[in-house]
Image (tube, rainbow, N blue to C red):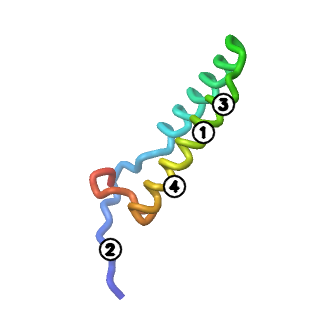
Amino acid sequence: MREIEHNPHEKRLTNGVWWALAIMLIVLWGGYFYFNAPDWWGVLLGLGSGSMLATWAIEKTGNKVPDIWR
């Protein structure tokens, strides 16, 4: 069995960026619905387009993180 090198002082990245982005997205959607009458065609088109883009990216990369992000 091969042993993996490990740096005990390696700084591990946290998911803090994703939590911040999720909170920001919730605030932006909340502000949109509070200050505007929702255009449901636009909302559904945006959600559908984002979902299709995410699905395409997962399919294209094989659900793997690019080397540059590691």
Rate crowding at label 1 as few (under 14), some (14 to 19) or many (20 or more) other CA atoms within 10 Å.
Answer: few
In the picture, the disc for residue 4 is 2
Q: Position of residue 3 (x, y in %)?
A: 33, 79
Q: Position of residue 65 (x, y in %)?
A: 38, 57
Q: Which residue is mark 1?
A: 47
- Residue at 68% from the left image edge and 23% from the top image edge: 39
SS category of the residue bearing label 3: helix
Q: Which residue is mark 3?
A: 41
**Left or right, 11 with reference to 52:** left
Q: Which circle's residue, 3 or 1, is located before the other in the chain? A: 3
Q: Which circle's residue, 2 or 1, is located before the other in the chain? A: 2
Q: Is residue 22 above or below residue 3?
A: above
Q: CA distance from mark 1 to mark 4?
A: 12 Å
Q: CA distance from mark 2 to mark 1?
A: 41 Å
Quadrant occupied by the N terminus: bottom left
Q: Position of residue 42 (x, y in %)?
A: 61, 29
Give whichever of 11, 59 is nearer the camera. Answer: 59
**Of the residues shown, which amino acid type is indicated by label 3?**
Trp
Give whichever of 43, 63 is nearer the camera. Answer: 43
In the picture, the disc for residue 55 is 4
Q: Position of residue 52 (x, y in %)?
A: 53, 49
Q: Which circle's residue, 1 or 4, is located before the other in the chain? A: 1
| In contact (CB < 8 Å): disc 3 and disc 1 | no
SS category of the residue bearing label 4: helix
- Residue at 47% from the left image edge and 45% from the top image edge: 14
